[in-house]
Image (cartoon, rainbow, N blue to C red):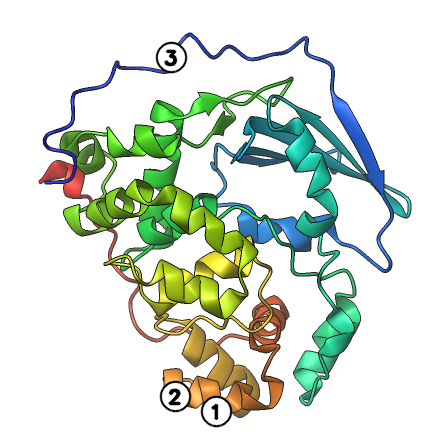
Amino acid sequence: MAGRFAPRPVRGIPAAVPRQAGAPARTRTWTPDGPLDLALVLGPLRRGPGDPTFRALPDGSVWRASRTPAGPGTLRVTAHGAQVRGDAWGPGAEWLLHHLPRLLGADDDPSAFAPRHRLLATVRHRRPGLRLGRTGLVLESLIPSVLEQKVTTDEAYRAWRLLVRRYGDPAPGPAPERMYVMPAPRTWALIPSWEWHRAGVDDKRASTILRAVRVAARLEEAAGMEPAAAQARLEVVPGIGPWTSAETVQRSHGAPDAVTVGDVHLPGIVGWALAGDRHADDAAMLRLLEPYAGQRHRAARLILLSGRVPPRRAPRMPVGDIARW
């Protein structure tokens, strides 16, 4: 069992990492070179409505708590006219502000996408603020992607929420309540088997995460590689395949061509949107996206934003609860 030989950690959140409510914020402003929609750019980083590392508030601000190479940090992003402002707290504040433009798609080139289908052209016209952001952090995208393997999104979101709240650090600065930075690699490695079980994570997914955090430094190095090379490095770890590596580099690298293969729903959605084929498989999906080589992930994002999905005919995938076994 995953972590069966690890010592049992102290229950609860360590009191040694208090919230730094009174710490001054470090600030940076940045002006994008085109339309920018914060919700569209940062939305893929949110792992469910209860994600402890992400919060979108009614005032339009977006908060993220991240574990950077410099340490934990909290980032608040707000739009002020044509400018974007970032406020950050914690040891990772400078790192987060330095990478703010990349996070918001400064390295992305939306003009490289040439729609060849009316649906894609329409959605692109209606969503001019879509950019593919780059976090520059691999593990924070890899671990929740592993949790999403072969289960419903609700199950994966619940596991991520429970584990981060239990073993993560409170977000630095005046972050909204119940925001946490994800656990450090060593902390992930010390989670005992019964806690994975209580969170609804089976041994296969837990073991994959444990193998990944043991080589965390090598995986984080992939943030500086080209997306294809980064995927190849991730897939060296047993349990990480093309689906998981694509889901990771889409966020860590802002990879415009990292199309997700092996997904239960995406081929049918793409097939239905572009060819009226609700039974399309991965091969058919890739054929339909071939005209968008180099921009296939962007094409898939636009299709998902269109809301054009095939009508449901089969019952929903049942939600499991291995914690009751």
Circle 1 SS class: helix
- Looking at the picture, how far across and down is residue 155, in whole percent? 31, 47
- Looking at the picture, how far across and down is residue 13, in whole percent? 37, 15
Q: Is residue 205 left or right of residue 172?
A: left
Figure quadrant of residue 88: top right
Q: Earlier in the sequence, mark 3 or mark 1?
A: 3
Q: Which residue is mark 3?
A: 14
Q: Name which residue lies at 68% across and 43% down.
A: 99
- Disc number placed over residue 215 in the picture, else none: none
> Considering the image in quadrants, where does the C terminus appear?
top left
Mark 2–mark 1 CB contact (< 8 Å): yes
Q: Which residue is mark 2?
A: 283
Q: Earlier in the sequence, mark 3 or mark 2?
A: 3
Q: Name which residue lies at 39% across and 53% down.
A: 145
- Looking at the picture, how far across and down is residue 190, in whole percent? 24, 28
Crowd tier of the residue under label 3, counting other residues whose Cα lies within 10 Å: few below 14, some 14–19, many 20 or above: few
Distance CA(mark 3)–CA(mark 1) = 51 Å
- Disc number placed over residue 287 in the picture, else none: 1
Q: Is residue 195 left or right of residue 156?
A: left
Depth check: give the residue in front, 318 or 36: 36
Figure quadrant of residue 106: bottom right
As shown in the figure, which amino acid type bears the numbered disc 1?
Arg
- Which one is in front in this view, the residue at disc 3 or the one at disc 1? 3
As shown in the figure, which amino acid type bears the numbered disc 2?
Ala
As shown in the figure, which amino acid type bears the numbered disc 3?
Pro
Residue 27, compared with residue 135, is above or below; it is above
Circle 2 SS class: helix
